[in-house]
């Protein structure tokens, strides 16, 4: 997940206006807040609402567990109760179904991005508001592992060519070496020993900047790795480049702070409600092999020498559940929820005609966007395309559609492209643009900070003014509840 600039003050206002002036932050009930910050409460809610599948038979964490999870991707969440070689169950699928995520937030799925964004404005206005406590004890350190052993965790080997067992949904907490302010982010981490991890840092991440400071001093950088922290802080950790202390955005989403606990062996806090906490230090100027790994693009990231952590301690809840994810729809949605609201706010400042933005799954959450507009002049579609590319750097394809097209329906979008898009006039091509590091199309530069790619924009809107031949067929909206209809 890459860097973008935030026009946050006007964005927050626009979001409020777009949804009738309702404020989301601080208005949710305690029951909703609890299931967004506590994985146990989340799982209980999913079961109560019929959105949880329990796998009771023994499952091998090497390939079999992920193979079963893949069958349910995009549907109900899944809990593996009996994982071979481990005392702990594994939970997957928290983010792969937008309807279920909407249920967890208690909002329609279309409003999820704006619910998340609602926490950013208040945090930007006062980063010190809703301060958390740092407790001595909490659920996350109820049990202290006598000797840290990563192999006791049920971390799966996901895809057939993955290089090993991975932590791919755990949140890293780190403090700025000079200011001491905590920051949070998610990184893929491969287990290479009982107390050793190799991991990837994408270019432009705060963790890389902090590590560079420490490596110049040849000193380790301390971290805590938090597994199973709950949906609200987890998704906030996926928002890129918000600045130091962005973890408090989740506090504003919930309307209350989320407490930390003191770590035992490092000077970095951990989430008090985490299922597992791994205390570690990143070794300075040490690189070891990491990968391959099945990435969000649907391709394998290659094996290269990358950064190394040494684990110093592991603590966990009394009856913890390990959280993992498949690098597919869950990551696409995590990026989409945050990027859609950002792009929408940025565009709405310039174009009041913009109705909605959707980062479709076929674009892997990073590379493709559909923008819906209420077209009122010639050239609007192309203008919106140009600004959409500026608003979110990883995008490679932008499609603009009219208000009468359902941007969430790929068939409807394809219909608009087939009947309203004329390549002679409506195609925008931008060559030699910055390319995202995980896309195999992108030839990575020697500095490892990305490469180049060609961007395409497709104006799939009808001509303005719209002539009679572009009038879409419509039907009367008949409420089914008014009729006696029998279903099989």
Image (cartoon, rainbow, N blue to C red):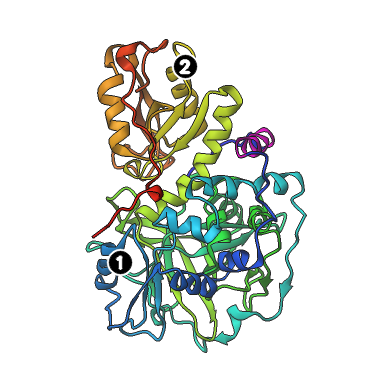
Magenta-colored segment: predominant secondary structure: helix
Residue at mark 2: 380
First-in-chain label (1 vs 2): 1
Q: Secondary structure at mark 1?
A: helix
Asked if disc 1 and disc 2 are in contact, CB closer than 8 Å, the reply is: no
Instruction: Tell me: 58 left or right of 251.
Output: left
For disc 1, the marked residue is 69
In the shown orientation, is residue 391 left or right of residue 266? left
Where residue 359 appears, as percent x and y from the top left, is: 41, 40
Is residue 364 or residue 374 the one in the foreground? 374
In the rendered image, the vertical position of residue 303 relative to residue 158, given as above or below: above
Q: CA distance from mark 1 to mark 2?
A: 43 Å
User: In the rendering, at what x and y percent does residue 190 appear?
Assistant: 38, 66
Q: Residue at x 65, y 47 (%)?
A: 120
How many C-alpha atoms fall within 10 Å of the one at disc 1: few (<14), some, or many (≥20)?
A: many
Q: Is residue 294 left or right of residue 370?
A: left
Residue 292 in view, yes or no: yes
Please provide percent x and percent y for residue 439: 33, 42
Q: Nearer the viewer, residue 378 or 447?
A: 378
At 30% from the left and 20% from the top, the residue drawn is: 421
Query: Over which residues does the magenta segment extend?
Result: 9-19
14 magenta-colored: yes
Q: Dot 2 lies on which element?
A: helix
| For residue 317, above or below residue 231 | below
């Amino acid at each position: 997940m890459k860097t973008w600039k935030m026009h946050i003050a006007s964005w927050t206002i626009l979001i409020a206006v777009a949804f009738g002036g309702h404020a989301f932050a601080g208005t949710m009930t305690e029951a909703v807040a609890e299931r967004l910050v506590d994985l146990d409460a989340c799982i209980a809610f999913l079961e109560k609402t019929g959105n949880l599948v329990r796998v009771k038979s023994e499952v091998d964490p090497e390939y079999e567990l992920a193979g079963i999870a893949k069958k349910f991707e995009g549907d109900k969440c899944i809990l593996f109760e009996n994982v071979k070689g481990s005392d702990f169950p594994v939970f997957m699928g928290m983010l792969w179904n937008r309807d279920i995520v909407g249920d967890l937030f208690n909002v329609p799925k279309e409003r999820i991005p704006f619910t998340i964004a609602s926490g950013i404005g208040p945090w930007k206005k006062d980063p010190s508001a809703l301060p958390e406590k740092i407790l001595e004890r909490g659920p996350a350190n109820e049990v202290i592992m006598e000797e840290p052993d990563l192999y006791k965790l049920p971390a799966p080997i996901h895809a057939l060519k993955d290089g090993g067992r991975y932590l791919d949904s755990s949140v890293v907490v780190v403090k700025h070496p000079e200011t001491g302010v905590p920051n949070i982010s998610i990184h893929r981490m491969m287990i290479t020993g009982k107390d050793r991890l190799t991991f990837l840092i994408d270019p432009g991440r705060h963790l890389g900047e902090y590590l560079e400071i420490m490596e110049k001093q040849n000193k380790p950088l301390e971290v805590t790795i938090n597994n199973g922290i709950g949906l609200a802080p987890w998704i906030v950790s996926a928002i890129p480049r918000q600045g130091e202390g962005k973890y408090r955005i989740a506090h504003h989403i919930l309307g209350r702070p989320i407490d930390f606990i003191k770590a035992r062996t490092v000077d970095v806090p951990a989430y008090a409600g985490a299922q597992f906490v791994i205390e570690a230090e990143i070794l300075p100027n040490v690189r070891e092999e990491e990968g391959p790994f099945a990435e969000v693009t649907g391709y394998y990231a290659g094996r290269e020498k990358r950064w190394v952590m040494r684990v110093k301690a592991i603590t966990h809840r009394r009856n913890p559940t390990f959280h993992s994810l498949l690098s597919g729809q869950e990551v696409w949605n995590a990026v989409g929820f945050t990027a859609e609201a950002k792009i929408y706010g940025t565009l709405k400042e310039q174009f009041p005609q913009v109705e909605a933005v959707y980062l479709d799954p076929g674009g892997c959450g990073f590379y493709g966007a559909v923008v819906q507009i209420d077209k009122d002049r010639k050239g609007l579609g192309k203008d919106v395309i140009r600004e959409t590319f500026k608003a979110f750097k990883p995008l490679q394809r932008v499609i603009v559609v009219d208000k009468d097209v359902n941007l969430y329906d790929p068939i409807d979008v394809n219909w608009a492209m087939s009947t309203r898009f004329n390549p002679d006039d409506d195609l925008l091509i931008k060559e030699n643009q910055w390319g995202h590091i995980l896309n195999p199309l992108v030839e990575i530069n020697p500095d490892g900070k990305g490469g180049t790619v060609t961007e395409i924009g497709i104006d799939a809107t009808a001509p303005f003014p719209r002539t009679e031949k572009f009038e879409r067929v419509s039907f009367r909206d008949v409420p089914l509840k008014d009729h006696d209809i029998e279903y099989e």
